[in-house]
Image (cartoon, rainbow, N blue to C red):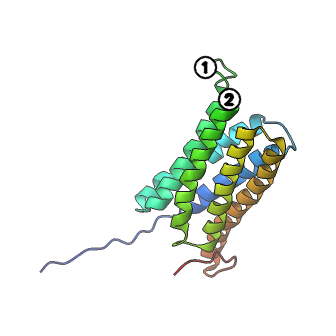
Amino acid sequence: MNQEIRLKDQTANPAPLGLLGFGMTTVLLNIHNAGLFPINAMILAMGIFYGGLAQVIAGIMEWKKNNTFGTTAFTSYGLFWLSFVGLSVMPEIGWAGTSSSIAMACYLFMWGLFTLGLFIGTLRISKALQVVFASLTALFWLLALGNFTQSASTLVFAGYVGIFCGFSAIYTGLAQVLNEIYGRDIFPIGTVK
């Protein structure tokens, strides 16, 4: 007489929110990295609110769905954006000194190493996420190299890789929304079976 009761999860998929928050903020920051405009309040505000808080919220929502990958990725990258804004703003308000290029290279290298680990996880999820995480790993390591060598051309190249990465995340997030709405693959993401 031991009956198992299963509840159907009827909550929304939080991944598009996280992907779009990450993607849009990444594109904007990397337009700066590509040399098209200086760092400014628009990038910092996106980093706090859409890249930062929206991804943390998406990560918490993924936790409720028992998705360890989504929880780890979205919460971590949301906190990356908040730490990035902190690195930019704290010296301006006198809370800390400016980080050296070597310190920034270490910071970016570690994020690249973390992202490489998550990339391995995407090999079991979808081709679209593989593109996002592979290009993000390359982005972090190019930015680390550019900071380490103080090479402006490497940082500009990294900016273009970042623009690609951000747009790949935007595509993946919008594809999930539109595919769900239409009940079929309008925009393929290459789900791994």
Q: Is residue 58 in sight in this rendering?
A: no
Residue 160, horizontal then vertical, whole percent: 80, 54
Amino acid found under the numbered disc labelled 2: Ser
Q: Dot 2, how many residues are within 10 Å of its Cα: few (below 14), some (14-19), or many (20+)?
A: few
Q: Residue at x 65, y 40 (%)?
A: 105
Which labelled disc corresponds to residue 95?
Answer: 1
Q: Is residue 175 in sight in this rendering?
A: yes
Which labelled disc corresponds to residue 100?
Answer: 2
Q: Residue at x 83, y 41 (%)?
A: 152
Name the foreground residue: 26 vs 117: 117
Identify the residue at the far top of this view.
94
Residue 146, horizontal then vertical, whole percent: 74, 43
Q: Residue at x 68, y 56 (%)?
A: 138
Which labelled disc corresponds to residue 164?
Answer: none
Residue 140, horizontal then vertical, whole percent: 66, 49
| Dot 1: element | loop
Residue 120, horizontal then vertical, whole percent: 53, 65
Identify the residue at the far left of this view.
1
Q: Is residue 8 above or below residue 142?
A: below
Q: What number of labels is visible?
A: 2
* Lateral position of residue 106 relative to residue 7, left or right: right
Q: Is residue 51 above or below residue 174?
A: above
Q: Nearer the viewer, mark 2 or mark 1?
A: 2
Q: Is residue 2 above or below residue 39?
A: below
Q: Quadrant of the N terminus?
A: bottom left
Amino acid found under the numbered disc labelled 1: Trp
| Dot 2: element | loop
**How far apart are labels 2 and 1 at the CA level?**
15 Å
CB atoms at circles 2 and 1 under 8 Å apart? no
Q: Residue at x 66, y 42 (%)?
A: 47
Q: Dot 1, how many residues are within 10 Å of its Cα: few (below 14), some (14-19), or many (20+)?
A: few
